[in-house]
Amino acid sequence: MIEYLLSPFHYDLMLKAMFVSAMIGGVCACLSCFVTLKGWSLMGDALSHAVVPGVSLAYMLGLPFALGAFVSGILAALCMGFIKSRTRIREDAVIGIVFTTFFAAGVLMISLYPSNIKLNTIVFGNILGIAAGDIWQMLIISSVTMLVVALKWRDLLLHSFDPNQARAIGLNVGVLHVTLLTLLAATAVAALQAVGACLVVAMLVTPGATAYLLTDRFGRMMIIAMVMGVLTSLIGAYVSFFVNASTGGCIVVLQTAVFLTALMLAPKHGVIASWLKGRASVTALMTGVPGEPVPSGAVMR
Amino acid sequence: MDHIAQGIDLVVQDVTVAYNNGHVALHDASFSLNPGTICALVGVNGSGKSTLFKAIMGFVRPVRGTVRIAGDPVKAAHKKNWVAYVPQSEDVDWSFPVSVWDVVLMGRYGYMNFLRIPGAQDKRLAMESLERVKMTEFKDRQIGELSGGQKKRVFLARALAQQGRIILLDEPFTGVDFKTEGAIIALLRELRDDGHIILVSTHNLGTVPEFCDQVVMINRTVLAFGPTETTFTEENLALAFGGALRHLRLDHTDVPGAERNELVVLTDDEGALVVGAGGRLERRKARNDDQKAGSEP
Amino acid sequence: MTRIFEPFQYGFMIEALLVAALIGAVCAVLSCYLVLEGWSLMGDAISHAVLPGIVLAYIVGAPLALGAFLSGLVCAGSTGWIKTHSRVKEDTVMGIVFTGLFALGLVMFSRVQTDVHLNHILFGSLLGIERSDMIQATVTASIALCVMLALRKDLLLYCFDQNHAKVVGMNTTFLHYLLLSVLSATIVAALQAVGIILTVAMLITPGCIAYLISDRFDRMLLIAVISAVFSALVGTYVSYFLDGATGSCIVLTQALLFVLAMVLAPKHGLLAARRIARASPVTVDLP
């Protein structure tokens, strides 16, 4: 039995996959805190789709795929910024238009010039077939991202919370904005290989949202998110070996399950906690016992 | 108090509203209005003004108490098109692709058939309503192309076209200049004389005595209710607003007929600029009094 | 010269053109409401979330469209529920729910042997669509179109001012779920023909094009439908010659129209804005 449970660790392939997933899970989770607070969830989705034309072009030209993906992601972000500032269309619609256009361009390119690049690899990821060179690319992206966040997290946090205040105390908001976008695009590229374009957004959103339900402190939120990101990625990759299913799918299903658990059971912001609180205060009101939510000044009849 | 006069009256009795998260926004609120009145609903932000509006419009179900319109529950009143609502300017998407005419016709939807095709009467009433608010010439404008006061008048015309008997206005004077404010007040008076109940939620205290017959003061419950002359008093305002109100007591005044050589200015969120004789600013004096007033009770 | 008309000699091309145009029209009508209601990405979410429904329907032998439809409703419903019961923002909730469902679909999909090609769901196969699927798509799309046109004024009021809609006695909860159901049904119809990504694009871009050009809703509907049908026809036609992905060609044609509208729109276009700014140089809009 134990032999069976340990069997994934006998395969070099699996060890590599678990290591890479955990690393990416951690980095994505770290960024997801900013993404959740800033309301940029859809940006993550959009960027992960928008990198496709860059990836296919890079493969065709024999360049590193991360470079192509990165350039194309930033290009998409610039397009969104331009259209949003110049037209009366809402941000969510602008994001939708730009990312579908980029994605369509990528799919068209691949269909016109079939090469050794598989569309499925981009869309669903293929962590088991990851090449050594790709792992190096990811390692570099991850460490740079972590370094930037470690050094500048206070600035980024202020930027997410109150850009005007950030500007007022003399921070360069434009640079912060572009930094965050760049980190997001870079991480999306790294995660692409692991879970695929469709599921990158989950890694960039779910851990942050889960942590947000569990705590009111940013430092703790970051730690919870990262622990969750690393653990779910490890376990997801491990489980996928046994159920013989898509690794990305397993990781994301696991993350969603953790989110749902937190949603119900979170001590202060959970559904059950607030339901109980609601019932208590209504009963208190009905029975005439002065309940906590009614301010003392208001009970005067 | 809740006798039923002719026409349609509004009776709010012991209404208690609690939200999902356990927040009790309003408790045991009671008052009643007879036809032909303009009533102000005043209170600080978060005092439950909008919750009370929602309860009257039937958007939230009270956990206790009832809202009755001419003896009917709210849902039935909706079917009869008795309640009309003029939204706050910030709640409207002004770039929405509808014209003034489209918006006024929306007031008639409750009377139209399944496909909402306007009949001759719908068009006639919509036209009359537009004429009444003097907006006929702007009929084909997109709603975003109007000034603040014109926007307000369009939504009033919609309420008129709906032939609502109870008209709820949410902060009608924000984003409206002083002159338009007068025009809107004149229109509301006309409607009152036609027998409408007009309920105005406002924190613009200065205009209340000018055009409101009755006042409901709330802070999580109804603190005071009655005719403006007897209810809109310094004590009641202090009760409703607590420390949130600026209390300026000036030691000299030019108001003719004032008994004492004293003037009291009450204001809530907008700080009042008070200029004394010879253009001397009275702010400092006022602030000193403010502190004194705070330590009194 | 004959080369230009070559595509029209094939029955499958004509059928593909017709289906693309019909689905384009239905999506265009929906996109007008979605743009105004701020639901642009609901289309994105639901179209990904149908995957587990499709796989499940395949396992139990039910019609795939039914499974997809129910799964889409589950996505929309749970997004709404979680949003009202937690402090997480709506877009975040949407991202979590639809990726969760999509991932679940992927895991289930890799566990069962099906003859449903994932690639067909993702990228569509307008030219290789099966007869029965085509009929199903046509019927669903037509019903969705009829419902929306019949209730277009109610839905418009719902998007514009929900409070007023309630006060005049309309059932807004019904309208909310009606719009979501129509959206799910349309996505199901469109998925089989054109694939997820194209569906998402078709549910956003035509509405935005029309919103840039017109300030009246009826005109907006018309412009959206015309631009969608035009791009569907041109895209399909061009893809025949390029021998490239049909869906992508349609999306790119739409994108091109959007850029044109953005620059040239009579009142809200970039050129018009510049003209107005030049005409009255005193009023400078501060950002």
Image (spheres, coloured by chain):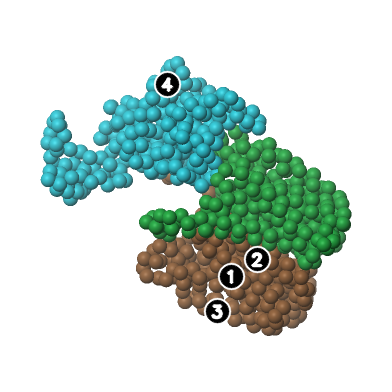
Residue drawn at the location 59% of the way across and 67% of the way down: A76
- Residue A66, image x and y in percent? 64, 77
- Residue B256, image x and y in percent? 14, 31
CB under 8 Å between callouts 3 and 4?
no
- For the image shown, how many numbered marks are present on the structure? 4
Residue drawn at the location 20% of the way across and 44% of the way down: B274
Measure the alpha-carbon separation of dots 2 and 3: 26 Å
Residue beneath disc 4: B195
Of the two numbered discs 4 and 1 in the rendering, the one whose residue sits closer to the viewer:
1
Residue beneath disc 2: A102
Residue beneath disc 1: A75
Indicate the chain coloured cyan by its letter: B
Residue beneath disc 3: A144
Amino acid at dot 1: Leu
Of the two numbered discs 2 and 3 in the rendering, the one whose residue sits closer to the viewer:
2
CB under 8 Å between callouts 4 and 2?
no
| Image: A256 above or below A4 | above
For label 1, the SS is helix
Q: Residue furthest front?
A: C1
Instruction: Give neighbour class at mark 2: few <14, some 14-19, many 20+ (Cα, 10 Å).
Output: many
Amino acid at dot 4: Gly
Q: Residue furthest top?
A: B6
The answer to whether marks 1 and 3 sit on the same chain is yes
Q: What subunit carries mark 1?
A: A
Residue drawn at the location 64% of the way across and 55% of the way down: C205
- The shade of chain A is brown
Residue drawn at the location 57% of the way across and 65% of the way down: A79
